[in-house]
Amino acid sequence: MSSPILLVPLALIAFFSARATWNIYLKDRDSVVELQTSQERLAKLEGRQAELSVATAKLSSESGIEGEIRDRYQMARQGEKEVVIVENPSSNQATLIVKKGFFQKIIDFFMKR
């Protein structure tokens, strides 16, 4: 059992078996990562398909087509008028409150008179 004639071939067989096992392990690990990325990509594509199905269903009706034309081309039917709502500019302005110190109040009191 301890002769070199028997140990060398057994060592070679063990080396090549360990190497093949390691390569299979690496391939398995890579395939798990690829499976996860493929599943994520599939989930994104299914979500996109659902969005497109909703958009297609919307465009299958007359009101959906009209709404899309109005949104994309800013068109209106003949006789329709545009309404512009303008906000009150004074309500949007922020008021600035300056806190004055004791000495600044005294200086302002004497300077105003």
Image (cartoon, rainbow, N blue to C red):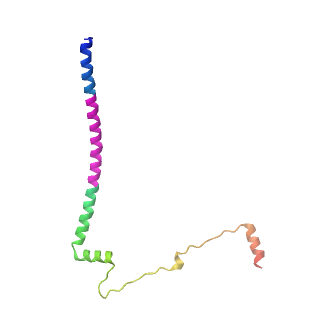
Residue 79: in magenta span = no
User: Residue 73 location, x and y as percent?
Assistant: 32, 77
Identity of the residue drawn at 73% across and 69% down = 104
Q: Is residue 104 left or right of residue 47?
A: right
Residue 29: in magenta span = yes
The C terminus sits in image quarter: bottom right
Q: Which residue is at the front of the view, 76 or 5?
A: 5
User: Residue 37 location, x and y as percent?
Assistant: 29, 48
User: Residue 63 location, x and y as percent?
Assistant: 25, 77
* Magenta-drawn segment: 19-43
User: Residue 67 location, x and y as percent?
Assistant: 29, 76
Q: Work out whether 87 lies above or below 99.
A: below
Q: Splitting the image into 4 quarters, where does residue 78 fall?
A: bottom left
Q: Is residue 81 left or right of residue 61?
A: right
Identity of the residue drawn at 24% across and 22% down = 13
Total numbered labels placed on residues in the image: 0
Q: Which residue is at the front of the view, 36 or 93?
A: 36
Q: Which residue is at the front of the view, 86 or 13?
A: 13
In terms of secondary structure, what is the magenta stretch mainly?
helix
The N terminus sits in image quarter: top left
Q: Work out whether 7 lies above or below 30.
A: above
Q: Splitting the image into 4 quarters, where does residue 102 fall?
A: bottom right
Identity of the residue drawn at 25% across and 64% down = 52
Name, please, the residue furthest toward the left: 60
Q: Which residue is at the front of the view, 9 or 79?
A: 9
Q: Is residue 20 left or right of residue 74?
A: left
Identity of the residue drawn at 24% across and 14% down = 6
